[in-house]
Amino acid sequence: MKILRQITVFDAADIAAESAFWAGLGGTVYEDDSFHSVIVDGKWRSGVQLAPNHVAPQWPDGVRQQQVHLDLHVEDIRTAHEHAISLGARLLKAADDLDTEEGHQVYADPAGHPFCLGWHRNVPAEHDFGATKG
């Protein structure tokens, strides 16, 4: 499985405030209705996804645990899917169509932590900002 880029994604009820915070540490924001990408030095480094019912975690030992997941952008989603499943991942939400230009599937690792395998066809790996509008 070839990983083209790795993005850390934060859940937030107010994605504008959350993405502005992360971009304020040294980047800019590319906005979508439900997802903001934080760009640092021209490269996609993190994201913030809309989670309307988000409750802030308590660290380190709170009842509400940490809420961050990884997006792994892969070259071949079918190969990456099989590889992840063979390592013990569980598919939580399948994409409607694996042949679309871009998309993602949601998985859980063996301990239950969510992560996504995503793809952006026709976007070269060296174009580190993977959004089709970027």
Image (cartoon, grey):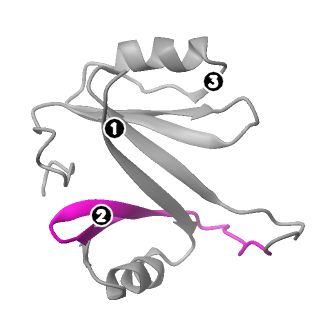
Q: Earlier in the sequence, mark 2 or mark 1?
A: 2
Please tell me whether mark 3 or mark 2 is closer to you in this view.
3
Q: Earlier in the sequence, mark 1 or mark 3?
A: 1
Residue 2 quadrant: top left
User: Is residue 40 highlighted in magenta?
Assistant: yes
Q: Earlier in the sequence, mark 3 or mark 2?
A: 2
Residue at the image position 46 percent from the left and 57 percent from the top: 8
Residue with the mark numbered 1: 73
Q: How far apart in space, not on screen, are marks 3 and 2 (Cα)?
A: 29 Å
Regarding mark 3 in the picture, which secondary structure is present there? loop
Regarding mark 2 in the picture, which secondary structure is present there? loop
Kind of residue at disc 3: Ala
Position of 128 with respect to 63 (left or right) is left
Residue 88 quadrant: top right
In percent of width and height, residue 83 lies at 49, 15
Residue with the mark numbered 3: 89
Residue with the mark numbered 2: 32
In percent of width and height, residue 51 lies at 57, 63
Q: Are marks 2 and 1 in contact (CB under 8 Å)?
A: no
Number of on-image labels = 3
Give the quadrant of the N terminus: top left
Label annotation for residue 123 = none
In percent of width and height, residue 118 lies at 36, 35
Kind of residue at disc 2: Asp
Residue at the image position 37 percent from the left and 14 percent from the top: 78
Q: Which residues are magenta?
A: 36-58
**Residue 105 sits above or below residue 24 on the image:** above
